[in-house]
Image (cartoon, rainbow, N blue to C red):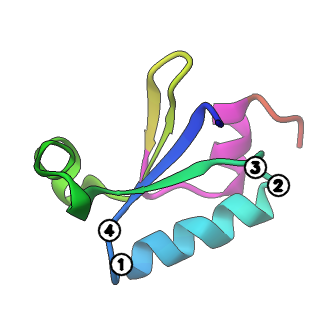
Amino acid sequence: MSDLILYQRDYCHLCDLALAVLAEAHAPDFESVWVDDSPQLQQRYGTRVPVLRNASDERELDWPFDAQAVCAFLSIPR
């Protein structure tokens, strides 16, 4: 299981854009979690999605982000 989690919603065009940005940044494997499946996640993330979370240190990167921001968040040399 990956430490990276992308919180997203069904039918979310911003979430689709975030997936493209993660691919552009060559982000490592991550888990996709749909906040629509959980009242607790809906309350926590609501309209903030997409949100990239590093579960190992609990940092979060809120949308909007680009490939450079993802690389900085993940400490990936660009």
Q: Name the residue under label 1.
A: 12
Q: Name the residue under label 4.
A: 9
Q: In the image, residue 62 lies at what x, y percent? A: 40, 46
Horizontal arrangement in the rendering, residue 1 relative to residue 55 (left or right): right
Going from N to C along the chain, the mark reached first, 3 or 4, is 4
The residue under label 1 is which amino acid type?
A: Cys
Going from N to C along the chain, the mark reached first, 1 or 2, is 1
**Residues at badges 1 and 4 in contact (C-beta under 8 Å)?**
yes
Total marks placed? 4
Q: Distance between the residues labelled 1 and 4?
A: 6 Å
Start-end of magenta stretch: 62-74
Label 4: state its secondary structure: loop
Horizontal arrangement in the rendering, residue 48 relative to residue 70 (left or right): left
**Residues at badges 3 and 2 in contact (C-beta under 8 Å)?**
yes
Whether residue 71 appears in magenta in the rendering, the answer is yes
Q: Distance between the residues labelled 3 and 2?
A: 4 Å
Q: Mark 3 points at which residue?
A: 27
